[in-house]
Amino acid sequence: MSHDLDERRILERAVLRALLPRDERRRTFLRAVGASTAGAALASLFPFGALTAMAQEKAKPEKPELKIGFIPITCATPLIMADPLGFYREQGLKVSLIKTAGWALIRDKMLNKEHDASHFLSPMPLAISMGLGSAQQPMRVMSVQNINGQAITLHVKHKDRRDPREWKGFRFAVPFDYSMHNFLLRYYVAEHGLDPDTDIQIRVTPPPEMVANLRAGNIDGYLGPDPFNQRAVYDEVGFIHLLSKELWNGHPCCAFGTSEAFIKENPNTFAALFRAVLTAARMAREPRNRPLIAKVISPPNYLNQPETVVEQVLTGKFADGLGNVKNVPDRADFDPFPWHSMAVWILTQMKRWGYVQGDVSYKQIAEQVFLVTDAKKYMAELEMKAPASSYAKVKILGKEFDPGQPEQYLASFAIKKAV
Amino acid sequence: MSGKAQSLAAGALSLLFLGVFLAIWHIATAPKAQVQAPADEYAKLLGKGAKKSAGLPTPEQLAEAALTHLKDPLYDRGSNDKGIGIQLAHSLARVGAGYALAILFAVPFGFLIGMSPILYRALNPFIQLMKPISPLAWMPIALYTIKDSSISGVFVIFICSVWPMLINTAFGVASVRRDWLDVTRTLEVKPLRKAFAVILPAAAPTIVTGMRISIGIAWLVIVAAEMLVGGTGIGYFVWNEWNNLNLTNVIFAILVIGVVGMILDFLIGRLQAAVTYVE
């Protein structure tokens, strides 16, 4: 904040000097009206906000060559498309996108500082910051990469077993323990009376390996990211049982983030990255851009998938594997705003299933890890609408979640891990 | 039957086996019926009628894929899409580095152990314990401590190739014929000279056998390690094509892995022939 003010003062002085080039006159003017009045008068003439922003834009990134890790899934659409469409370059960054084999490696390569920033599952930065499942290191979420866009896919042999109550003994795959997929799948089966820890089996499987495992019959289904739900339909081994938006419309999935240390050491690079990814998100939100985006992210260097599969995911006009063509334009969307309430929900579910024990200071952790202030600032620069409050009540399978009452919410569940 | 006639017959038989194998493959994978042009939208969304990379390829499809890869082995279309030649070079560099380190460690150390029966017995339990551990099990620890995935790959190669060499070197050195050592004692040969002029040549065939076993294991392991860590290398190539469920490319990569492994084994085999002696 003070950094901004300094910059603004420097700009004001520069403008004043340009208006009244002679020192003597300028001093008399300043003495007569006072520095702050002079500043206000100038502000009415000059768009200082925009100028400050431009000055920052020009601030050279401390570290222009960056390595960013990603998992080849459509959740990463904004951060991937920013490469072929030149959004990183526009910000003076030279980014290598590193396709990574699984979420554990994404975590390790961030902890190692091999990657400068990364595609994360949105619960991961919370977990890493809390030291759950890894060494503790403060990670930050700059923006949510995508909302919705996941699905429960079942093997075609289960076409007639659509009621979760019949799923006892099923083996499911999720991408990672600390994933929305894991928490949403657990939530879903628990709402239907199954205990996810004892009635079904949940395995961690890297998303790209899910279809191969489904085909081999190693699993009965998965709550996984696209394009692998659609890919199972395309390969005629699975069908889409339900889209994740039917569980919680607008749920976050993946996030874009980096470590707190990186932000401190490279504030300008951080700002440039933020702008690049938000620019991509802004473009990705427009439905008319989706076919083009599908085209640029499908090649082997990025997703390595048939274009038609990616296009069905992004446009929401897709074959469901049961013989129907569905049209769900908001099947996947890319709202970047990192809601604190989302973080609080994630934390309640971590506690519900025993990933964290004892007292959790929900709000404090959420506000530390999800960088709402920065997101608002850079979204405003790009004229993207950000909500005023970062907390909102949401409905998940018809049940209301109030981020102000996490403990009460937690107590309201019948099925949870007994601690 | 003379030797020449025998090897001719063996070659002909090899070709026959290959022919039968290709014929069976061809028949088994031949497309059943011509795929209909997409009748409706649903079929179109499933990619019916279009070229779909599902299932096992026919030999012709594989040959076509192999040709495309071999025509342009060194292309570089970004950090995640490089030609097969570049991927192989990455894998070979990792194997080369890990294997060289293993030789530098295992041969001198094995020498020491082999010369000292007490050390041999004292260290044997540790070696026997470490030997059967899958090198990939080391990966999480390597990543955590080394903090670099590429070097972790090299470490995994090192750890898997070090044991056969160490054991074989120690064994080879320990079982040098007693009479030869007695002769050196009678002639009062200096220890260093004894090591290089008598023990090393005597133990060389056993040492190189260990090296040959190691290179085989190293080449097996690099593929798995790269599938795990990703980024570059032939293992990453297999993984990336597996993601796309493109079995044609996977089979092509398997063939390449086989050929390279054979060449590596052949090279060490030549070395082995050079150091072998007849008593």
Image (spheres, rainbow, N blue to C red):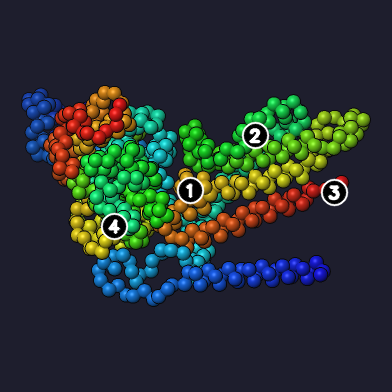
Density class for disc 2 (Cα within 10 Å; few <14, some 14-19, many ≥20) is few
What subunit carries mark 1? B
Density class for disc 3 (Cα within 10 Å; few <14, some 14-19, many ≥20) is few
Whole-angstrom CA distance, mark 3 to mark 2, is: 31 Å
- Dot in front, 3 or 4: 4
Instruction: Name the residue that disc number 1 marks.
Output: B227
* Label located before the other in sequence (2 or 1): 2
Instruction: Name the residue that disc number 3 marks.
Output: B278
The reply to whether residue A86 is visible in this rendering is: no
Marks 2, 4 in one chain? no
**B254 w.r.t. A394: above or below:** below
Instruction: Name the residue that disc number 4 marks.
Output: A159
Instruction: Name the residue that disc number 2 marks.
Output: B128
- Dot in front, 3 or 2: 2
Marks 1, 4 in one chain? no
Whole-angstrom CA distance, mark 3 to mark 4, is: 70 Å
* Residue A24 placement (x, y as % from top left): 14, 28
Q: Amino acid at mark 1?
A: Met
What subunit carries mark 2? B
- Dot in front, 1 or 4: 4
Residue at 47% from the left image edge and 33% from the top image edge: B144
Residue at 73% from the left image edge and 50% from the top image edge: B271
Instruction: Please report contact status of discs 3 and 4: CB closer than 8 Å, yes or no.
Output: no
Whole-angstrom CA distance, mark 2 to mark 4, is: 52 Å
* Label located before the other in sequence (3 or 2): 2
What is the secondary structure assignment of the residue under circle 3?
loop
What is the secondary structure assignment of the residue under circle 2?
helix
Residue A37 relative to residue B250: left or right: left
The answer to which of A138 and B42 lies nearer the viewer is B42
Residue B109 relative to residue A121: left or right: right
What is the secondary structure assignment of the residue under circle 4?
loop
Whole-angstrom CA distance, mark 1 to mark 4, is: 33 Å
